[in-house]
Image (cartoon, rainbow, N blue to C red):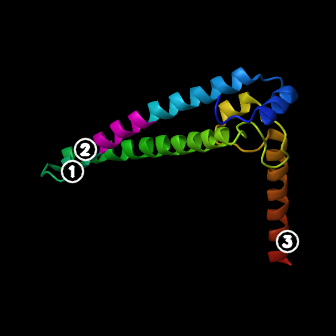
Amino acid sequence: MPGLDPTTDRETREARGDDLAEVQAFVEELRGERDRLLVELEERQTLERDVAAQLGEPRDDAEQAMVQREVDRLEPLARRSAERIDAIQRLLERAAQGRVAVCDRCEGPIPLARLRAIPGTTVCADCKEDLEREARRGEATGESEELG
């Protein structure tokens, strides 16, 4: 598949047991999901615009409140879809660089199961835990400095 670095992917799949076909299939799944989400997002945004346009029409308070609730319901859905599309796009860009399943921190493998669960991730589970520990230590240090 274009964009996948065979050397990196071979080393990565040997380290974790994923084969290149699985990685390629995963990338294709991501493309399909991105395309589906783009269509859904456009539909939601169109609906949101239509509902928002109804807000401008004179209505009684009950109807106005109902339309506003619908706008309030749609906005977070569109935002979540856009965030998911962004995460998938970043992962597809990593795939084009041959780094779809390579940890940015340790250069080790990121299992496909982790990528499926957290598509925006760029670090393996071990490095994520290390980063969280470092963040907690930093917070603790910051608190003690403030108190000191």
Mark-to-mark CA distance, 3 and 2: 51 Å
Q: Which residue is mark 2?
A: 51
Q: Viewed as shown, does residue 91 lie left or right of 48?
A: right
Kindly identify the amino acid type of the residue bearing the numbered disc 3: Ser
Of badges 3 and 2, nearer the viewer stands 2
Q: Which residue is mark 1?
A: 55
Label 3's element?
helix
Instruction: Give coordinates of residue 56: x percent, y percent.
Output: 18, 53
Rendered image: mark on residue 144:
3
Residue at 25% over, 44% down: 51
* Residue 43 within the segment the image draws in magenta: yes
Q: Viewed as shown, does residue 78 lie left or right of 61?
A: right
**Residue sitting nearer the eye, 94 or 74:** 94
Residue at 70% over, 27% down: 23
Rendered image: mark on residue 20:
none
Say few, some or many: other residues with alpha carbon within 10 Å of mark 1 (under 14 / 14 to 19 / 20 or more): some
Q: Viewed as shown, does residue 68 lie left or right of 15?
A: left
Residue at 34% over, 43% down: 45
Q: Mark 3 touching mark 2, by CB under 8 A?
A: no
Q: Mark 3 touching mark 1, by CB under 8 A?
A: no
Label 2's element?
helix
Residue at 84% over, 27% down: 16
**Residue sitting nearer the eye, 53 or 121:** 121
Q: Is residue 55 above or below residue 30?
A: below
Mark-to-mark CA distance, 3 and 1: 51 Å
**Range shown magenta:** 38-48
Q: Quadrant of the C terminus?
A: bottom right
Mark-to-mark CA distance, 2 and 1: 7 Å
Say few, some or many: other residues with alpha carbon within 10 Å of mark 3 (under 14 / 14 to 19 / 20 or more): few
